[in-house]
Image: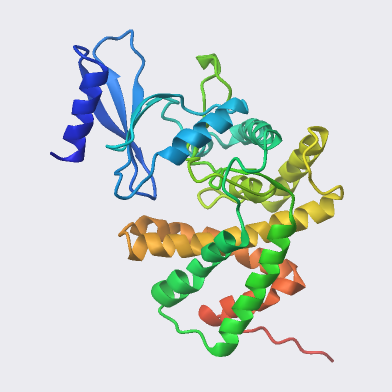
């Protein structure tokens, strides 16, 4: 029996004698798929069913983080039923409009939507405790960085690095890791961006945004989720606006008592350096999704991520070796200046 048939059979046991139909709700970069169950009875709200094949996905982190974030006051789906052996979860439906869709339809909503997203993020961060979520430790951060040489450079660009280039790359990695690990630690969603935040209708009685795809949450650097939100791979904002939003977050976080840097310049440097780590990782992940998983659509999102990375590396002397390497990889000629 295929997964869809198994899923329908399981749902029928949850809702005997209650006819329903299934339609794709969304898919993500993993093996998980989501379906919307709509009922013939018009008084019943639609529900979301997650299909997470046990051979590839573990539902237990989702259940755990849903509880942790929910107790923090975040608007996450409620888990109504689950079958871990089959990899099925039944969830409340947070709607069908992502932040990305809402912002593409009406960019004038940006300030209010991001204000809500920042408020929800601060709520989650204020609930942070040690030993609740896995640590975003050096080993994990480094594994993420290593996706870049393994998948973006070697597989996507098909370029072998010279020993000097490898040494240069590792020097930048060490610099970034030192900064990332020294940052204050809080709960980190890890993909807090426009495709995983849902715009909730004002009359729905629940706070904005609805938050999805949080199963990989960890305890790590305070700036990480802010980078995911403001330097999003799928929608870009001008740097002046990102700076303004970052200041507003920093002020709100300070008022909430979060352990952030007292000087905004230090905070923003950490934000940008955390961004460099994330952008390097994302380029590797997008390359892997394309070449290993056959999801070529992610290649079109690479230029925006590369633009973020290049701009950050250009601003900080310690990251210039990464900029030089990127120029070499992409055949960008060095501009030679002349003095007279």
Q: Quadrant of residue 12?
A: top left
> Outermost residue, left direction?
1
240, 18: nearer the viewer = 18
On the picture, is 107 further left or further right than 82?
Answer: right
On the picture, is 148 further left or further right than 19?
Answer: right
Tell me: residue 19, above or below residue 9. above
Q: Residue at x 56, y 49 (%)?
A: 232
- Tell me the quarter of the image containing the C terminus: bottom right
Q: Is residue 225 visible?
A: yes
- Tell me the quarter of the image containing the N terminus: top left
On the picture, is 242 further left or further right than 331?
Answer: right
Q: Is residue 308 visible?
A: no
Tell me: residue 131, above or below residue 147. above
Residue 216 point in image, percent of width and height:
50, 46
> Outermost residue, right direction?
263
Residue 95 point in image, percent of width and height:
43, 26
> Outermost residue, front direction?
131
Residue 88 point in image, percent of width and height:
31, 34
Residue 246 point in image, percent of width and height:
73, 45
């Amino acid at each position: 029996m295929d997964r869809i048939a198994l899923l329908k059979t399981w749902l029928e046991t949850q809702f005997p004698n209650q006819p329903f139909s299934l339609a794709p709700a969304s898919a993500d970069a993993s093996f998980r798929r989501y379906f919307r169950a709509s009922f013939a009875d018009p008084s019943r709200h639609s529900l979301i069913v997650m299909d997470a094949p046990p051979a590839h996905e573990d539902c237990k982190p989702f259940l755990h983080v849903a509880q942790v974030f929910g107790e923090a006051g975040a608007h996450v789906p409620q888990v109504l039923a689950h079958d871990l052996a089959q990899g099925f979860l039944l969830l409340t439906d947070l709607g069908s409009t992502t932040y990305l869709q809402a912002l593409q339809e009406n960019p004038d909503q940006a300030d209010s939507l991001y204000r809500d997203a920042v408020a929800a993020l601060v709520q989650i961060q204020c609930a942070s405790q040690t030993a609740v979520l896995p640590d975003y430790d050096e080993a994990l951060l480094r594994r993420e960085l290593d996706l870049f040489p393994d998948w973006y450079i070697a597989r996507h660009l098909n370029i072998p690095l010279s020993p000097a280039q490898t040494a240069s790359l590792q020097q930048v990695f060490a610099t970034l890791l030192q900064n990332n690990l020294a940052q204050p630690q809080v709960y980190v969603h890890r993909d807090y961006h426009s495709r995983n935040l849902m715009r909730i209708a004002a009359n729905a009685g629940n706070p904005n945004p609805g938050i999805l795809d949080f199963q990989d949450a960890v305890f790590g650097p305070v700036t990480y989720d802010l980078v995911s939100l403001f330097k999003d791979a799928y929608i870009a904002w001008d740097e002046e606006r990102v700076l303004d939003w970052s200041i507003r977050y920093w002020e709100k976080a300070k008022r909430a008592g979060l352990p952030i840097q007292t000087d905004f310049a230090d905070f923003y440097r950490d934000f940008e350096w955390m961004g460099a780590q994330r952008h390097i990782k994302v380029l590797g992940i997008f390359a892997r999704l394309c070449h290993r998983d056959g999801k070529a659509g992610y290649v079109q999102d690479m230029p925006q991520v590369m633009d973020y990375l290049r701009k950050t590396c250009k601003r900080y002397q310690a990251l210039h070796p990464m900029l030089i390497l990127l120029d070499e990889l992409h055949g960008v000629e060095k501009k030679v200046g002349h003095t007279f």
